[in-house]
Image (cartoon, helix red, strand yellow):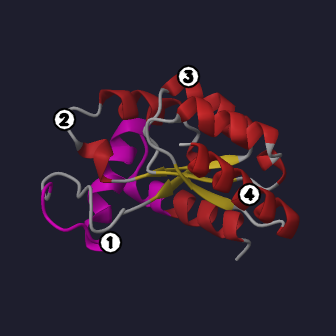
Amino acid sequence: RAVQLKWFERQLQMAVEVNKPVIIHSREACADTINILKNGNADRIGGIIHCYSYTKESVKTFYDMNFYFGIGGVLTFKNARKLVEAAEVIPMERILLETDCPYLSPEPNRGKRNSSLYLPYVVEAIAELKGISAEQVIEQTEKNARDLYQL
């Protein structure tokens, strides 16, 4: 754990030095992740919380640090209550679509190798949750990616 924390801090420091956003893969380490991001001035560069899996209460903290939220196939799972609650409060302007290939295929393909071909299932789940059209989800998440990556 100490080695992971050390190198996480160092990688974040390098990203801040070169002014590039970071992609954070954090599982079961919300408090450590928040502390390192806050102490490492991550709000200056922002980035993505990949495969967001934390609570709706943590959304504001990451949002305030200029982060986007990667949402993928887990949103379609029947047991994804915590992610559904979080996705409800994440503004559309901060959602990015993810596949996490080869893992976490959305229903009805759960258990199969994931693919970007399955993103429409995630789009539909977000559209239903947010009460907007699939086209609006696609347009907004594309804009979000372009904004983050300065494309």
Q: Which residue is mark 1?
A: 116
Q: Few, some or many C-alpha atoms within 10 Å of disc 3 (few <14, some 14-19, many ≥20)?
A: few
Of mark 1 and mark 2, the one earlier in the sequence is 2
Quadrant holding the C terminus = bottom right
The residue at the point 79 percent across, 56 percent down is 45
Alpha carbon distance from label 1 to label 3:
29 Å
Could you tell me residue 52's position as x and y percent? 46, 44
Looking at numbered disc 3 in the image, what kind of residue is underneath it?
Glu
Where disc 1 sits, the SS reads helix
Q: Which residue is mark 3?
A: 57
Where disc 4 sits, the SS reads helix
Looking at numbered disc 2 in the image, what kind of residue is underneath it?
Lys
Of marks 4 and 3, the one in the foreground: 4
The residue at the point 23 percent across, 58 percent down is 105
Looking at numbered disc 4 in the image, what kind of residue is underneath it?
Arg
Could you tell me residue 81's position as x and y percent? 31, 27
Please give left or right for residue 76 compared with residue 132 in the image: left
Q: Which residue is mark 2?
A: 78
Q: Which residue is mark 4?
A: 10
The residue at the point 30 percent across, 52 percent down is 73
Where disc 3 sits, the SS reads helix
Residue 4: mark: none
Where disc 2 sits, the SS reads loop
Q: Is there a contact, CB below 8 Å, between mark 1 and mark 3? A: no
Of marks 2 and 4, the one in the foreground: 4
The residue at the point 61 percent across, 34 percent down is 32
